[in-house]
Image: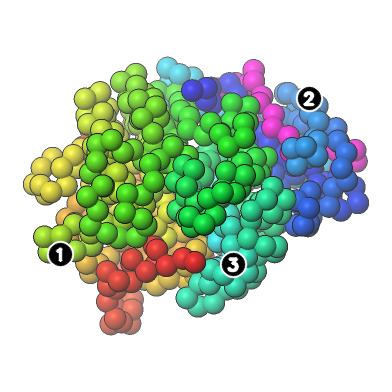
Amino acid sequence: MPGLDRRSFLVTGLAAGAVAAVPGAALAAPTPTPGAAGDGLGGMPRRAFTVQWQVYADESCRRVVRAGVAEASPEWGHSVHVEVDHLQPGREYWYRFRVGPYVSPAGRALTAPDPLSFGGPLTVAFVSCAQYEHGYFTSYRRLAEDHPDLVLHLGDYQYEYTRNTYVAPGGNVRDHEGPETMTLANYCQRHAQYKTDPDLQAAHAGAPWLVVFDDHEVDNNWADEMPERTEEQPTFLERRAAAFRAYYENMPLRRTSVPRGIDMQLYRRVRWGALANFHMLDTRQFRDDQGCGDGYKDCPEAVDPARSIMGFEQEAWLLDGFRRSRARWDVIGQQVFFAQRDNNAGPAKITSQDTWDGYVASRQRVTQGWIDAGVRNPVVLTGDVHAHWASDLKLDYDDPTGPTVGSELVTTSISTTGDGADSDPAAHPFLKINPHLKFYNNQRGYVLTKIDRDALTADFRVVPVVSAPGSEVRTRATFVIEDRVPGVQQTYLRPLDPSIAARRAITVEDTVRQETERP
C-alpha cells in the first residue's frame, strides 16, 4: 500500500466561514469550522473556493519551499487534501493555507528519514476515544505541549450519539449538537463541532497524524455490513457510506483512501527510515460479525479458524509486510485489545467478543506470522477500552510459562467515561487472572513513546480530571521494551496517594461496565 515516504507528507485543510472563507490548517485535520451548521457545510456557501497552500522551511513562515493551489468544493465539504513531494528527508517543515485575505495558523510537519537511515529518536504519542460530552480535551493540549514527532489516533475520534444518550458516570459537561449521526450532513456537523475545540486544534497543529477509525465514527460495535442494532440493517450501508465520506473529508488521508460508496482503503503501511514500520490496521470494515454478540462471553465461535477480525486479504497483506520488513521496530497501530483478557478466575474463559479475543484464530495467525518472519521487535498499539494497559504477548495464553513473543501498549481515553479514578494497578483482578497483563490505570490521558535503536520507552500520561478544563498532566508509569527482548518492563510507577489506596478496590464488573455499558 502506498504510504508516507521520506520526501512527502500530507496536508489537509478545510476552508470554512460564516460570511467569508476562513481556511483551516493542520497536518492531521482541518482547523475549525466556525459553526456546526445542520447542513454539514459549516456555514459555507455552496460554491467552490480557491485555496493557496504554502510549505515553509522555518517556523516564522518566511522561507517558502513549496506552494500550490487547490480547490475546496462543497461536494467534498470544502476540504482540501494536498500531497506534497520533493521535500528533504528527516526535517521539520511548517505549512498554512490562504483564502483571499484570510490566513490560517501554521501547522508543523516532519518528514521521515532516508530509508537507509535511522534518523534521531522518534517521539510518538498515541490516543483514542474522545467523547466530546464526557469531558474537556485537556489531554490533547498536554500532548501538543509534549512536542511529539508523530501522533497516532487509533479510533473513536468522534461519537455518534445525540445529547443525553451516552452519559458519563459524573454527568456530561457539554452536549453534542444535532441528532444521532445517520446522514452525511449529520456526520459533517459532528466533525465540525469537534474541530471547534481549541485543545484538539493544538494537537493537530503540533505534529503530523496517522489515523484509523474504530466503531463510533460510524456506529457502536459495527462489523462489516452489520450495525449494532439489527433493526437498522436496511439503512446501515447508507449510513456507513456517509460516515466514511465525512471521515475522509475531515481527516489526513491520501487519494488512495477516497471512499467509493461503502468501501474505503484505510489500512496502510508507513516506513520511518530504517527505524520503524507502522502497520495501520482496519479491524472494522472487513471483520466477521461478533460470533456471540457483544460483551464478555464464553463463545465457541471465538476460536473458529474461518473467522477473521480484519478479513483474510488484510491478514495476508500484514503477514507479507512482516516478511518484507527490515525495520528495527514493527509497530502495529490498531483499534481493539489484542492480548487475551479472561475475566473469570475459574475454568470458563469469559472474554470480550468485540476484541481480538472474539477472533482467536485471527490473532494466532498474526502472531505466528511475525514469529515466522523473524520480526525483530513487534509492538501492538491499541485504544478502545478507556483505560491504560500494558501487556506481554503470547502465542498460547493458556500456558503462562510459555515464551513472550511481543508487547502491547494500550492508551486510555482522551475523555470517554469521564474523570475515572486512580488505583493500585497491581490490585486489578484482571492482572491476577491474566499474568501476562502488567499494568492498569483508569484515568484519562494518552501514551507518549520514544522509539530509539536500543529501546522503546512508553510514558503513560494522565490528567486528574476532565470534568473541568486545564488539568496538569503527569506520568503514572513508564515501561520499556528493549531491542530483541519482547515484553514490557516497568521502570517507574508514581506512588499512589494513600487516601486513594484506601478506597474500594476496582472489580471485574467495574471494568466490564466501563467498556461495554453504552446505549
Q: Which residue shows up at 54% across the image and 26% down it? A: 4
Q: Which residue shows up at 46% across the image and 28% down it? A: 269
Residue 39 placement, left or right of 321: right
The amino acid type of the residue labelled 3 equals Glu
Residue 182 on image: x %, y %: 64, 53
Mark 1 Cα-neighbour bin, 10 Å: few <14, some 14–19, many ≥20: few
Residue 9, by quadrant, is top right
Mark 3 Cα-neighbour bin, 10 Å: few <14, some 14–19, many ≥20: many
Residue 479 placement, left or right of 153: left
Residue 207 on image: x %, y %: 58, 41
Q: What segment is highlighted magenta in the picture?
A: 79-102
Residue 252 on image: x %, y %: 62, 37
- Mark 1 or mark 3: which comes first in sequence? 3
Using the numbered discs, state the Cα–Cα distance from disc 2 to disc 1 in whole angstroms.
Answer: 61 Å
- Mark 2 or mark 1: which comes first in sequence? 2
- Mark 3 or mark 2: which comes first in sequence? 2
The amino acid type of the residue labelled 2 equals Gly
Residue 320, by quadrant, is top left
Q: Which residue shows up at 62% across the image and 44% down it? A: 238
The residue that mark 1 highlights is 345
Please identify, in this view, whether the residue under mark 3 or under mark 2 is nearer the observer.
3
Secondary structure under badge 2? strand
Residue 98 placement, left or right of 178: right
Label annotation for residue 133: 3
Using the numbered discs, state the Cα–Cα distance from disc 3 to disc 2 in whole angstroms.
Answer: 38 Å
The amino acid type of the residue labelled 1 equals Ala
Above/below status of 268 relative to 505: above
Q: Are marks 2 and 1 in contact (CB under 8 Å)?
A: no
Above/below status of 192 relative to 134: above
